[in-house]
Image (cartoon, rainbow, N blue to C red):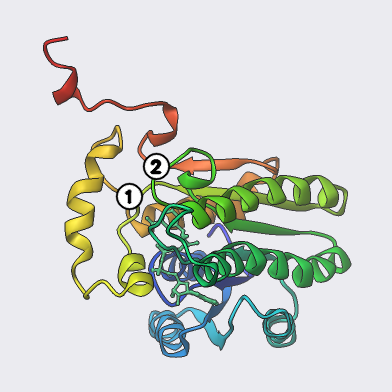
Amino acid sequence: MLLKDKVALITGAGSGIGRASAIRFAEEGAKVMVADVRTESAANTAAEIGQAGGTAKSIAVDVRVGAEVQRMVEETVKLFGRLDVLFNNAGVYVPKNVVDTTEEEWDWVVDVCLKGVFFGCKYAIPHMVKQGGGVIINTASGAGIEGVPNLGAYQAAKGGVVIMSKGIALDFARHKIRCNTICPGVIETPIAENCNNIPAGASAQIWARSGVMHPLGRNGKPEEVAALATFLASDQAAFITGVAMPIDGGFNAGAFIPPELLRGR
Ligand SMILES: NC(=O)c1ccc[n+]([C@@H]2O[C@H](COP(=O)([O-])OP(=O)(O)OC[C@H]3O[C@@H](n4cnc5c(N)ncnc54)[C@H](O)[C@@H]3O)[C@@H](O)[C@H]2O)c1
């Protein structure tokens, strides 16, 4: 087991990547605090882990609110005695360029995706320093390391997460705290339905179009991102800190031209 007896706290764990990671972390022996603004979803993930024989508890948190994030961290330490892994994963997006983005939309996206990560690190790191080390994983995006159309606020937030995480890696390396970022391509989760009032089940239409953007010719699965998070959380990654790791079917390798368009050149 890669995470035996480690204590992990995952935000946005009621759905998608966070949910898959909570389940995988628990399978690998971690005790997991499942945090989400949607209380029922978080409780469902924790219950599923419990039914499978793992250890998990859920907690409601709005990562935009510092006092709530502080309470989430403190409850985790109180319940499980320590905090080995913080996975700042909660995120939202608005599919608009900067001209069309309203101030409210900007604040929502940047506060969840960037300020939420800041708060998580701010309140977890002192515990990790005190206990002699820890691991932070932050979910950014391929859109945090490459230009992507129509994601004005999201790009700003995710780019901020990437570079802030590198700074955190430097600031706390001598306290044996590792901090890395995950940068997924399109992953088949309900994020569009959760953020943009797209009807349940309609994501399949988006995925049908987005698969071909990735050189490997398909979108990713939440379980594939969970596998990367598990590795980064584990001692197998003990010499890895300060990286922004793409998991995107080759999207970051360069400008991809689908082979169909290259034929006849
Ligand atoms: N799905 C993708 O294609 C993709 C690609 C790149 C990056 N990401 C990133 O991966 C992360 C997880 O996304 P996902 O695809 O699993 O989406 P998702 O919608 O399935 O899960 C995100 C979770 O975050 C929670 N959340 C939203 N606002 C919150 C808040 N204020 N406080 C606490 N929790 C909150 C939601 O309730 C939801 O359960 C996000 O940071 C997202 O930006 C996703």
**Which residue lies under the disc numbered 2?**
248
At label 1, the amino acid type is Gly
Considering every residue shown, the one lying at the far top of the view is 265
Q: Quadrant of residue 212?
A: top left
At label 2, the amino acid type is Asp
**Residue 165 visible, this angle:** yes
Percent position of residue 26, x then y: 50, 71
Q: Is residue 72 above or below residue 219?
A: below
Percent position of residue 63, x then y: 61, 76
Question: In the image, is the residue at mark 2 within 8 Å of ligand 1 by its beta carbon?
Answer: no
Q: Is residue 75 left or right of residue 110?
A: right
The residue nearer to you, when weighing 226 against 112, is 112
10 Å neighbourhood of mark 2: few (<14), some, or many (≥20)? many
**Are the residues tagged 1 and 2 within 8 Å (C-beta)?**
yes
Picture residue at 72% right of the left edge, 71% below the top? 83
**Which residue lies under the disc numbered 1?**
220
Question: In the image, is the residue at mark 1 within 8 Å of ligand 1 by its beta carbon?
Answer: yes
Image region (quadrant) for ligand 1:
bottom left
Q: Is residue 263 left or right of residue 157?
A: left
